[in-house]
Image (cartoon, grey):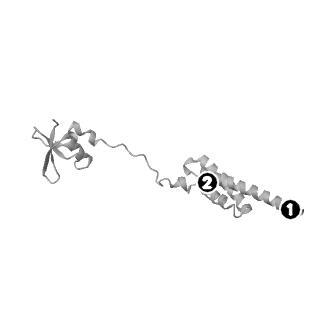
Amino acid sequence: MSQQYTIKGTDGAEYGPVSTEELQHWIAQSRCTRESLVKVDGSGEWVPLATLPEFQDAFAAPPAPAPASAEGGVSTVIPYKNVPALIAYYFGVFCIICPPLLCFPAIILGVIGLRRVKENPEVKGTAHAWIGVLSGSFFLLLSIVIGVFFSTRMLS
């Protein structure tokens, strides 16, 4: 048969006797603390619950959670610490509207953004910078091809 315990509540009332398993559930439910007074059946002495060897594991400190970054992952989605990469991304996306005007800044800012990530990976923004460089390059080449095509059509 399991050991039996009597607990003294914060209100001074005595609860029990309860089994080891039941007391483990009470600890898990935070109904008992390390300082809760307990009396083991057969002894007339009240002792703090944490002093009993069978319950010391229940009060062991839980593993520390992994440190979460202060921004909660936002800097991965929006690289606000790498402004050139972010601006390169928007210029690259809007190159479709006005290719010659926005392509050069998208490429230049994208390269600057990639350099910043290389110097300090914590700033994030690699994908944004690459989108700026690639879309800026693509739309610049596309505008050159279209310009050459139409200029040759106009001359013929």
Q: Is residue 57 placed above or below 113 in the rendered structure?
A: above
Indicate the amino acid at tag 2. His
Q: Residue at x 63, y 50 (%)?
A: 114
> Where's residue 115, x and y in %?
64, 49
Q: Quadrant of residue 78?
A: bottom right
> Mark 1 sits on what residue?
153
> Where's residue 54, x and y in %?
22, 37
Q: Residue at x 59, y 52 (%)?
A: 125
> Where's residue 72, x and y in %?
47, 54
131 or 79: nearer the viewer: 131
Q: Is residue 104 placed above or below 39 in the rendered structure?
A: below
Indicate the amino acid at tag 1. Arg
25 or 36: nearer the viewer: 25
> Mark 2 sits on what residue?
128
What is the number of the mark on residue 7? none
Image quarter in which the N terminus is found: top left
Q: Residue at x 79, y 57 (%)?
A: 145
Q: Quadrant of residue 93?
A: bottom right
